[in-house]
Amino acid sequence: MPDAQQHKPDSQSTGLCADCLHSRRIESARGSVFILCNLSFTDARFLKYPRLPILSCEGYSPKEADKLR
């Protein structure tokens, strides 16, 4: 029986993190998925595993921006 707490984040459930340059998808051995904010390693304002969905963020930088340059 699947755990009720398990769910797979998508763009609706993660908000801005879904396409942020600083986010990384982490999957546990049990199949749970978490979003890690890499900014948390250098800036204490950012949580390592933010509560989702993130609707506004000072550190947000879209991944697509790098492809346009």
Image: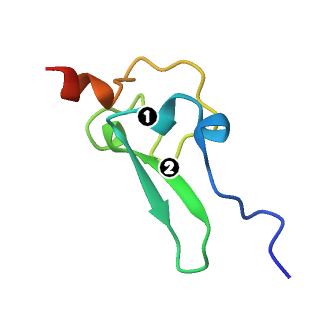
Q: Residues within 10 Å of mark 2 (few under 14, many from 20)?
A: many
Q: Is residue 56 left or right of residue 52?
A: left
Q: Residue at x 34, y 24 (%)?
A: 61
Between the C-alphas of marks 2 and 1, the distance is 11 Å
Residue 67 place in picture, x, y as percent:
21, 28
Q: Which residue is mark 1?
A: 19
Q: Residue at x 39, y 33 (%)?
A: 20
Viewer-nearest of labels 2 and 1?
1
Query: In the rendering, which numbered label is found on residue 6?
Result: none
Q: For the residue labelled by badge 1, is the local secondary structure a helix, a strand or a loop? A: helix
Name the quarter where the C terminus is drawn: top left
- Is residue 33 among the parts visible in the rendering? yes
Q: Is residue 50 left or right of residue 39?
A: right
Q: Specify the amino acid type for callout 1.
A: Asp
- Is residue 51 among the parts visible in the rendering? no
Q: Is residue 40 above or below residue 29?
A: above
Q: Which residue is mark 2?
A: 35
Q: Residues within 10 Å of mark 1 (few under 14, many from 20)?
A: some
Residue 30 place in picture, x, y as percent:
61, 79
